[in-house]
Amino acid sequence: MGQQRDIKDALYQLSTFISAWGNSDQNNETLPFVTIPNSEAIMENIRKQGKFETMGYTPYLLREHREPWIEYANARYQKWVKEAHVHKYGNLDRLSQTGYHPFISQYGPNRTVVESPEANLVMASWMYSPPPASYFLINGNALSVPRLRARNLAVLELQNETVISAVEQHIGVPVAFTAEEHAAYHSKLTDSSAANPHSFAAYPVHKTTGDPTSGAVAQLSAAFAWDVALWNLLPDGVQGIHVVLRNTCTQSYTYNIVGGDAFFLGDGDHHQPQYDQYEVPVSLSLHSHPDFEKVPGHCLYSMHIFPSETFQGSFDTNTPEVFAAIVASTFLLVAVAFCIYDLMQGKRNSNLINKAAQSNAIVTSLFPDMMRERLFLQAEQKQAAKSKKGSLKTFLNDGKQGAVDNSMNLLSKPMADLYLSTTVLMADISGFTAWSTVREPHQVFTLLESIYACFDEISKKRRICKVETVGTYFEY
C-alpha cells in the first residue's frame, strides 16, 4: 500500500508542476503544447520518488491541434532530447539522432511506420525519462496501440485517478535503455530480474492546476517493477511470508518476502494451501471515483498475504517446554527435599518427645511433684542465666562478670524446705552383704527390686517423700 501511495503522489506532483508551468506567466506555451524545462532533472527526481524505471509525458491532441502540434514538435524535439542526454550521461554518445517522424505516427502492416489516420483524438508521445536513445518514439500515437488504448481512455474518463495496467512487457527496452542496462538495474536489487513482473501507472495532467473538472490535457505514464513495489513490507529478521499479487485482469504472481526484500517465486498462486485460513487480503487500489471499478482498461490489484512453513518454523521453538521442564523439575526437587526435611524433623521431634517423656518419667518416679517442679524451674533459670551471660550487654559490662557467676552459683544451691514437725525414717537390710555373696546376681536384683517397689508403693499411698536410696539404705 505504501508503494501505491508513492506512485500516486509522485505522478500527482509532476502533473501539478506541468499544469502550473503551462499556466504560468513566465511561459509563453499553452497546454497541451508544453515542454518541461530541465526535463531530465525534474523527471529523474520523480522517478526516484515513485521508484519508476521509466516515465513519459504524452499530450492529448484534438483534431484541431494536430497540425499546430507538428510545427511545435518539429521546432523543439532535438533541443529537449539533447539537453536530457547531457544532463543524464554528460554527452550525446548514446543518442542516435535518427528515427524522427514529422507527423503523428503509428505502426502499419509488417510493423512499418505510417501516419496515423485523422481522428478526433490522438496522443502524441513527447517526453521521456531516461531520455530515448533515438527520436523514434516522438509523435507516436499511443491510442493506436490496442493494449494501451483502453488504459489511456480510462485515464481520460476518470479524470483524477491513477490507473494501473496489467502486468506486461516493459516497452522502454530498448528505447530508454538497453536490455543489458535494464538487467543491470535489476541486479542491484536482491534476487531481482528484468523478466519479473512490471506494470504501468498513468495519471492525467489537468488544464487548470488542482482542478480535475477542468479536463485532462495530457497524461503521465510510468513503468515500475513489482519487486520494488513490495519492498520494505517486513522488518529485518522476519521471513517466510508469501504474498500473492492478484488483479482483476485474471493475473496472479507470488513473492516470498524476507525482511525488506521481495523474491519472485513465479506466475500464479504458489502459497502453501495449509495456511489458507491465515490469509490477509490487502487492497492496493487508491481511488475515489464512484465508477473506478466499472471503467475498463485497467486492473485493480490486491495483495493476499500468507504465512509459510519457514515463517512458522521461525516461531516454533521448544524453549517453553524446556523452561516448563526446568520449573517442574525444580518444583519436584524442592518438594522432595521438603518432604525429606519434614520427615527428618518429625523423626527428630519424636525422638525429643520420647526422651523428654522418659526423662519426665524418671524424674516423676524419683521425686515428688513439688521437688520435680522445683527441678524444672531451676533448669529454666539456669538456661536464662546462660542466655544473659552471652548477650552483648553482658560482654561489654565484663566488670560485673563475677556477679553473673555468683548468681549462677546461687541458682545451683541445694533445694531444702523448713518443716517444724518432720519424721525421717532411715532403714537398712541387715545381713544383706553376707547374704548377697552366696546368691546369684539376678537373685540379688530380684530382692532389691521387690523391696524398692513395696516401699515406693507404700510411700506413694501414704504421701511420704522418699529422700534417697543408696544400696540397701533407705531414707523416707
Image: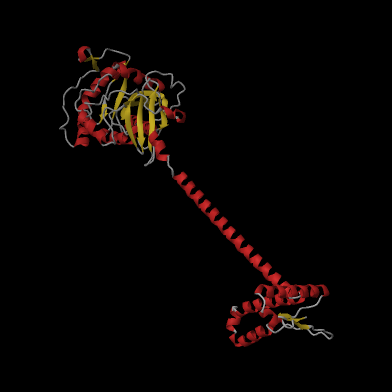
> Which residue is pictured at 40% across the width and 36% down the height?
311
Residue 10 in which image quadrant = top left
Q: Is residue 124 visible?
A: yes
> Which residue is pictured at 27% across the width and 27% down the height?
195
| 35 and 116: which is toward the camera | 116
Residue 445 in which image quadrant = bottom right
> Which residue is pictured at 40% across the width and 24% down the height?
300
Q: Position of residue 447 (x, y in %)?
A: 72, 74
| 229 and 461: which is toward the camera | 461
Quadrant holding the N terminus: top left
Q: Is residue 285 visible?
A: no
Q: Position of residue 318 (x, y in %)?
A: 43, 43
| 389 and 166: which is toward the camera | 389
| 33 and 112: which is toward the camera | 112
Q: Tell me: 15 left or right of 475.
A: left
Quadrant holding the C terminus: bottom right
Q: Tell me: 20 left or right of 133.
A: right
Relative vertical location of residue 213 with respect to residue 462 in this rendering, above or below? above
Q: Position of residue 307 (x, y in %)?
A: 41, 33
Relative vertical location of residue 330 with respect to residue 287 in this rendering, above or below? below
Relative vertical location of residue 11 with respect to residue 438 in this rendering, above or below? above
Q: How many marks?
A: 0
